[in-house]
Image (cartoon, grey):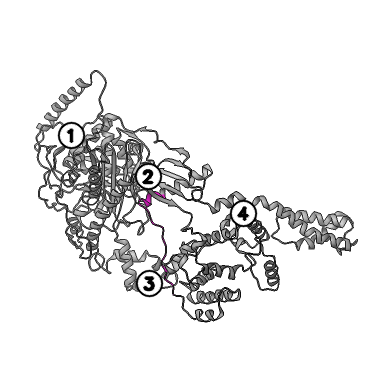
């Protein structure tokens, strides 16, 4: 018989081979069949085997399977892997001072030894899942044969032992879940390995500690706490039977969602215990009539003292472990971080206390019959954006009917109201000398909002972005004593639109130094300076200083912080100012050790990158000292009594949607952001909405605690830049003479003198920009306009929200003991001769606190005018 004819006649036989067999094995069986035909094992001209061929075929099938098993052995988990699975140790994260911050477990599990598990659990498990557990060695051949016969007869049954189930639980990726011959063989091989390595009690202990029970509960201990609020050692026979009954199908027999099915399955398990002699029949008759009595409580891992930091670290550590051949969930890594546990606790407390005060303001501003009225278009817009509304419309409900139905659902509206009006905050502190992160608070409460407002959230920074404009100007050679006139500014944008930045009061027409322009956060001065320096130069400087992940739109309105950025970027950039113009990338880890204490890798601070010349940086730093001494950040001195050498900047965006404050100390730079997850929700209070009153107290409280605890040195001063060339002193004097000469001439022509640079005054409000043509990020940013006057201009009803206790059920809300007064409508007159800014004193005295002056109403602007709002 020719080979081609043999292959043709063998085609039906080959088609009957199991489809799950690998291609190499199928090809091998094909060749074997061909050779048997040529060897005379089939009758000539037919596929009918001879007696010799039949015997040969019967022997060939098990031989082929045995060969395949031998081939699969290297592809199953090795003995070392099995040992590792039993002795796995999660990575431990420690603070710089040795306190535990987090433990990275792969599952929410508490491993308990077998002797601390109720014997009812073991009896129920063995009776139901594998009653010959102590007689076999991993594979129960009698059960396998029985399961095969039932399966062939149409009643599919499983034949897996407890050891085989353990193999699947431990190695789901290596073994798989597909119903194929390959998977069953891998499972059997692994089960034999486990039996060779473990005792029976060790197998039971491992199985009961790794089996899943829904709701992120792994192992019998977490299951006992989740469903019955007790430890595994205290489970009675009914509770044990309920949990073991879930193993056949966690979701199908879920006692929380499917109690009737769970009850029937529990009684089936009790019946199996009677059948195997583990339970008395009379006792069974009594027990099967009892209800489930579930005491459900979802178990969550404790968030730890720095949960947002830990989550960001976990992402980084997984990548490091993959590159270096480690498992963060099993290898017992010890990660030493840069977090200072004391500073972290102080930051968390400061955010919590100020957040509670502001929440009371928000509750009053958005009360159900006030800001949250059902007829408000904004509330209806929120409802239309919910999944419930979209689901109803997708199911065929008319949009208006779906809206009406949800607006009548009080529980739904209450939950929506709470989520939308929950005040949020972010806080970050970095050591500017090495870039090490010392404190990280991503939200007010990690359990309520796990979203990270330090690294994930991008919000408009408002006036906290202005130092980049002034830094670029000082780098070009401008000085703090250079002046610009506080006058209306019109800047033509692409598309023919005109940008007219404004401040709270009308322009004074007076000359103002650049120093006072930043100290009082004047938008008109900053916008003119931006035109002289150029948006491209400012954006480039901001990137060099640390704003490297967010996109910056190169448009004039960038000067007032219209491009959204992260708090982490802004604090890192201010760290560049505090570090004499050298940027150091923030770092989280100092070293990683193994479980025995051996150092695996040490992480040095990132290489410093020169971003701004030291002379320009020192000038900018000196001007930002004045922001704290007499400007918008004066509360640091007057309210918190901080006398250290510090500098900083506040920020507030349009309608008080975002409040910012960043403070620099030679040893620590810290910043806070305050707002709502939805920027359409604001505090609706011109007092509390400003960064000087929302974010500044968090930072001030933090620094006050850190200085009192002597964690940072209150006597430390920023490094002074000294010019080294021979004519430095002479050059300084000449520049001063020329500056005085030309400024005196210019001042003599000006009828109104500029403000005195040292006179204490309250911050002028900053304005916010609508987007210029083609620039989506130029949405309103820096805002210090009084919200009430703006609303009146728009014809809206204004609800005044006073600072004191606004919510009877909340913590009392009282204004600061010494609040910074609102900036006067007109800046105070100053002497015609520019004053040279004095050197900062080591211990500045508190700024006097004048009585707040009501903001002057703002004249409504023409429709073509874009009014950015400035911040303090």
Instruction: Identify the disc placed on residue 402.
Output: 3
Say above or below: 17 vs 781: below
The answer for how far apart the CA atoms under marks 2 and 3 are is 55 Å
Disc 2/disc 1 C-alpha distance (Å): 38 Å
Most distant residue in the top direction: 726
Query: Mark 2 Cα within 10 Å, few/some/many (few <14, many 20+)?
Result: few
**Picture quadrant of residue 203:** bottom right
Closer to viewer: mark 2 or mark 1: 2
Quarter location, residue 135: bottom right
> Which callout, 4 or 3, points to the residue nearer the camera?
4
Tag 4–tag 1 contact (CB < 8 Å): no
Can you tell which mark lies on residue 528?
none
Q: Is residue 584 above or below residue 365?
A: above
Nearest to the observer: residue 755 or residue 86: 86
**Magenta stretch, overall SS:** loop
Q: Do the residues bearing badges 2 and 3 touch, measured as CB atoms within 8 Å? A: no
- In terms of sequence position, does the residue under pointer 1 or pointer 3 come before the other? 3
Circle 2 SS class: loop
User: Would residue 396 be found to the left or right of residue 468 on screen?
Assistant: right
**Mark 2 = which residue?**
98
Q: Residue at x 31, y 66 (%)?
A: 380
Judge depth for marks 2 and 4 and give the one in front. 4
Residue 733, horizontal then vertical, whole percent: 17, 23
What numbered label is drawn on residue 197? 4
Number of residue marks: 4
Q: Which residue is mark 1?
A: 840
Label located before the other in sequence (2 or 3): 2
Q: What span is colored magenta in the figure?
A: 293-311
Res 647 → quadrant: top left
């Amino acid at each position: 018989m020719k080979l081609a004819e043999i292959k043709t006649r063998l085609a039906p036989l080959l088609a009957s081979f199991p489809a799950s067999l690998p291609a190499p094995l199928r090809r091998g069986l094909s060749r074997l069949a061909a050779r048997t035909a040529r060897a005379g094992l089939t009758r000539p001209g037919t596929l009918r085997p001879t007696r010799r061929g039949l015997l040969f075929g019967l022997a060939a099938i098990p031989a082929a399977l045995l060969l395949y098993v031998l081939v699969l052995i290297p592809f199953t988990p090795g003995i070392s892997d099995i040992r590792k699975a039993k002795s796995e140790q999660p990575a431990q994260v420690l603070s710089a001072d040795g306190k535990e911050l987090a433990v990275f477990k792969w599952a929410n599990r508490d491993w308990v030894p077998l002797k601390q598990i109720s014997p009812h659990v073991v009896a129920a498990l063995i009776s139901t899942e594998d009653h010959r557990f102590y007689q076999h060695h991993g594979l129960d051949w009698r059960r396998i044969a029985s399961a095969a016969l039932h399966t062939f007869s149409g009643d599919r049954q499983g034949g897996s032992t407890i050891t085989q189930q353990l193999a699947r639980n431990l190695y789901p990726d290596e073994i798989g879940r597909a119903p194929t011959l390959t998977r069953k063989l891998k499972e059997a091989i692994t089960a034999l390995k486990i039996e060779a390595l473990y005792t029976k009690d060790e197998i039971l202990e491992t199985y009961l500690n790794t089996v899943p029970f829904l709701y992120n509960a792994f192992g019998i201990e977490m299951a006992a706490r989740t469903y019955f609020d007790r430890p595994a050692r205290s489970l009675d026979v009914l509770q044990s039977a309920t949990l073991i009954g879930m193993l056949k199908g966690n979701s199908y027999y879920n006692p929380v969602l499917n109690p009737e099915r769970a009850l029937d399955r529990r009684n089936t398990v009790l019946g199996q215990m009677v059948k195997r002699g583990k339970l008395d029949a009379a006792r069974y008759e009594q027990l099967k009539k009892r209800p489930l009595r579930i005491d459900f409580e979802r178990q969550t891992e404790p968030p730890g003292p720095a949960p947002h930091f830990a989550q960001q670290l976990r992402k980084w550590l997984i990548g490091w472990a993959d590159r270096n051949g480690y498992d963060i969930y099993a290898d017992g890594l010890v990660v030493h971080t840069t977090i200072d546990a004391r500073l972290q606790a102080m930051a968390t407390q400061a955010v919590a206390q100020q957040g509670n005060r502001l929440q009371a303001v928000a509750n009053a501003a958005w009360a159900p019959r006030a800001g949250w009225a059902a007829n408000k278009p904004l509330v209806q817009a929120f409802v239309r954006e919910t999944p419930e509304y979209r689901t109803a419309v997708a199911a065929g409900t008319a949009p208006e009917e779906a809206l009406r139905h949800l607006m009548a659902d009080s529980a739904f509206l209450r939950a929506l109201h709470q989520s939308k009006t929950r005040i949020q905050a972010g806080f970050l502190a970095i050591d500017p000398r090495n870039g090490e992160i010392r404190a990280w608070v991503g939200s007010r409460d990690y359990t309520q909002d796990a979203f990270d407002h330090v690294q994930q959230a991008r919000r408009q920074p408002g006036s906290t972005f202005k130092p980049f404009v002034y830094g670029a100007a000082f780098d070009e050679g401008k000085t703090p004593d250079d002046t610009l006139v506080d006058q209306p500014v019109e800047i033509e944008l692409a598309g023919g639109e005109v940008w007219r930045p404004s401040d709270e009061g009308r322009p004074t027409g007076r000359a103002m130094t650049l120093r006072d322009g930043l100290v009082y956060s004047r938008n008109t001065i900053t916008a003119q300076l931006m035109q002289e320096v150029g948006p491209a130069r400012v954006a480039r400087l901001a990137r060099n200083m640390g704003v490297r992940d967010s996109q910056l739109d190169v448009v004039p309105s960038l000067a007032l912080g219209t491009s959204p950025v992260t708090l982490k970027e802004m604090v890192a950039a201010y760290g560049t100012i505090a570090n004499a113009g050298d940027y150091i990338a923030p770092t989280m880890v100092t070293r990683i050790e193994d479980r025995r204490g051996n150092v695996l890798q040490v992480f040095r601070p990132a290489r410093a990158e020169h971003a701004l010349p030291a002379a320009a940086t020192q000038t900018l730093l000196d001007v930002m000292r004045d922001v704290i001494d007499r400007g918008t950040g004066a509360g640091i001195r007057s309210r918190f009594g901080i006398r250290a050498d510090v500098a900083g900047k506040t920020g507030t965006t349009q309608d008080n949607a975002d409040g910012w404050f960043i403070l620099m100390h030679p040893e620590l730079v810290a910043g806070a952001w305050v707002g709502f997850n939805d920027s359409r929700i604001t505090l609706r209070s011109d007092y509390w909405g400003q960064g000087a009153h929302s974010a500044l107290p968090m930072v001030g409280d933090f620094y006050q605690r850190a200085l009192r605890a002597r964690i940072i040195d209150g006597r430390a001063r920023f490094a002074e830049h000294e010019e080294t060339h021979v004519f430095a002193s002479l050059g300084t004097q000449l520049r001063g003479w020329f500056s005085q000469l030309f400024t005196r001439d210019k001042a003599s022509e000006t009828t109104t003198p500029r403000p005195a640079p040292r006179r204490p005054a309250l911050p002028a409000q900053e304005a916010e920009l609508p987007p210029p043509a083609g620039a989506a990020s130029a949405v309103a940013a820096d805002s210090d306009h009084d919200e009430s006057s703006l609303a009146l201009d728009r014809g809206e009803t204004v609800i005044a929200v006073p600072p004191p206790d606004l919510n009877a059920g909340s913590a009392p809300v009282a204004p600061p003991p010494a609040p910074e007064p609102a900036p006067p409508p007109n800046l105070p007159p100053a002497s015609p001769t520019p004053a040279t800014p004095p050197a900062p004193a080591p211990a500045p005295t508190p700024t006097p606190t004048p009585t707040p002056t009501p903001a002057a109403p703002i004249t409504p602007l023409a429709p073509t005018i874009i009014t950015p709002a400035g911040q303090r």
